[in-house]
Amino acid sequence: MDKIIIEGGVPLNGEVTISGAKNAVLPILSACLLTGGWHTLDNIPRLKDIWTIKEILSNLGVVFEEDAQTLKVNSDNLNSHSAPYKLVKTMRASILVLGPLLARLRKAKISLPGGCAIGARPIDLHLKGLSAMGVDVNLEHGYVVASADRLRGADIFFDITTVTGTENLMMAAVKAEGETTINNAAKEPEVVDLANMLNGMGARIRGAGTDTITINGVKELHPVRHAIIPDRIEAGTFLIAAAITKGKARIKGCNVEHMEAVIKKLLETGMEIEKQGEDLVAMGHDKVKSVDIKTIPFPGFPTDMQAQLMALMCIADGWSMIRETVFENRFMHVSELRRMGADIETNGGQALVRGKGVLSGAQVMATDLRASASLVLAGLAAKGRTEISRVYHLDRGYQDLDLKLSRLGSKIWREKY
């Protein structure tokens, strides 16, 4: 097992290129189940979650060919409709194979991902939407068992905005009879990227990126070549890395329109960010101003950037209030930041941070993907050595984060333990 070691206090300096977005790849790979032939996907990151979804698809009969950042996907020999618990237990996004399997095979048996309460992450909304489309849905021994003689268009309203729910129903609806409308749909760029890929396959989807998406079902789809959008969360993490180390970095290959909320908030902290085409040039300063944030769905401040911004607020001048409204239990990084000297008080979905100007290196443990990133950022700014264990969480969503930071001048490396 790996741990990451950081000798903090070194300002970043140099260039870094952003990888493809994990949260866009997962539904797009699932969408390859909808039709046979060779799909070609460009800008694929090398991540643990991508390996997991490939294992799930391979178990269904999908084959792959890959070269550098290009992945070819073929589901001509789709021979199963079941995704067992042993494959999906580590990744909640595994539920994304449900919609395309129903669209193509009219049946699916998918294990509920490990630790997933139906109400806590709104998988129930996926199932209600599919029921409205004529799918018979049952929960049996920890599995979603679903089947339909035919899928029909429906008018669906989400009580709570759900990204994976929007994606799942959109994939199911592309081959349904008639028109499907998804109201209160997620507007995230990853949803739009999936819709663009599906439309390239011959689907008829309108309104992606708004809160109302309309899908007119088609009988046939065809394989497509599609390039994955840049990872806005990775790009935001490197912006904060420049700010927290008081360094300067050119962050290459961004989609700036996807990052407006993060950029605006970081400008409020006093850092400089210059937009140059698809690049961002970021410069941190000695004094970091405290800011308040509230996480909300896109186009608001993303929940996946909350932990990273909290790390920055730990060294800011003044008090910051951070409100997490998207997911419960998203403050697990707080106890580890406290080990590094952070002054943070939590109360339910709120965290009050008193900036202290400096953190101290310590032995800490990663608890989830974005918490891992916050600890890396804190370690970059801290005095002394920081050792982060359980960094397999980090590898689920960041391609070579430690190597990229090392190329920017950070004293960061991995060791076995």
Image (cartoon, grey):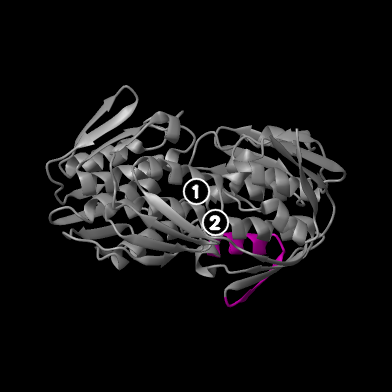
Above or below for 121 versus 312? above
Report the residue marked by disc 2: 45
Report the residue marked by disc 1: 50
Amino acid at dot 2: Pro
Instruction: Specify whether residue 266 is painted magenta.
Output: yes
**Residue drawn where x is 60% and y is 51% of the image:** 398
Can see residue 154? yes
Instruction: Report the residue that reaches farthest toward the bottom.
Output: 277
Q: Which residues are magenta?
A: 260-277
The quadrant holding residue 113 is top left
The percent position of residue 11, horizontal first and vertical second, equals 82, 60
Mark 2 and 1 residues: CB-CB less than 8 Å, in contact? Answer: yes
Instruction: Specify whether residue 81 is painted magenta.
Output: no
The percent position of residue 362, horizontal first and vertical second, equals 81, 36
Q: Is residue 373 left or right of residue 121?
A: right
Q: Is residue 194 left or right of residue 343?
A: left
